[in-house]
Amino acid sequence: MLRINKFVSSVAGIGYLPLAPGTFAAAFAGILWILISNKFQYANNWQLPVVLGITLLGVYTSGKISQAGEKDPSYVVIDELAGMWISVLFIPPTIINILLAFALFRFFDIAKPLGIKRMEKRKNGWGVMLDDVLAGIYSNIALRLMIMLIPFL
């Protein structure tokens, strides 16, 4: 069962890339978001259940890995997938919006301002996931502000 949790938490192995697995996972999440959005003709009714499902799956699988003795290993990137998807939740899935969300999300995820760092102190899977969830929320808010203020977005 631990192997399945590692497979899911690593987003099918992306987390095992030797350089910047979190960045690659966030980029993969953006590409996947566009593909899924195009499939559903930009309908929004699928977004919240899918994002909640991925987030809870990440809490569960990364929690199981933590219980096995590994505390937030670098191969766990399901948190980046969930955070990136929160960044674009209910935002038109254009290439520009996805790129901006990616840049904003990586900034918030790496810099960890505004209480994001404190989220890592939560136990088990919650600590792994909540910092990226909050980074995704901040990115979504920042992107919405940019869309409102910049006419060509």
Image: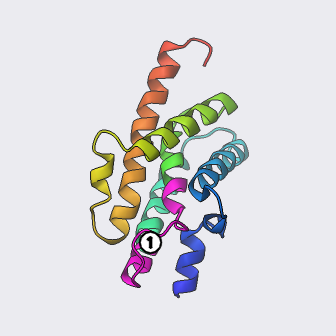
> What residue do we see at 34% from left, 64% from top?
126
**Residue 24 % position (x, y):** 64, 53
The residue located at (39%, 83%) in the rendering is: 69
Q: Is the residue marked by circle 1 packed among few (<14), some (14-19), or many (20+) residues within 10 Å?
A: many
Q: Is residue 92 visible?
A: no
Q: Amino acid at mark 1?
A: Ser
Placement of 151 over or under 140, stated as above or below: above
Where 106 falls versus 58 (above or below)? Answer: above
Task: Give whichever of 102, 144 is nearer the camera.
Answer: 102
Which corner quadrant holds the C terminus? top right
Q: In which quadrant of the rendered view does residue 60 lie?
A: bottom left
Looking at the image, which is closer to me, 139 or 90? 139
| Colour style of the rendered protein structure | rainbow
Query: For mark 1, what is the residue?
Result: 62
Q: Is residue 88 magenta?
A: no
* 79 magenta-colored: yes
The answer to whether 135 appears left or right of 24 in the picture is: left
Q: Which residues are magenta?
A: 61-81
Q: Does the rendering let one see residue 62?
A: yes
Say how many tags the image has: 1
What residue appears at the point 44 percent right and 72 percent down from the top-left corner? 62
Q: In the image, residue 81 lies at what x, y percent?
A: 55, 55
Q: Residue furthest front?
A: 19
Relative to 97, 123 lies left or right = left
The residue nearer to you, when weighing 88 against 100, is 100
Please determine whether, in this image, residue 151 is positioned above or below residue 138.
Answer: above
Q: Secondary structure at mark 1?
A: helix
Q: Residue 82: where, in percent of width, then height?
A: 50, 54
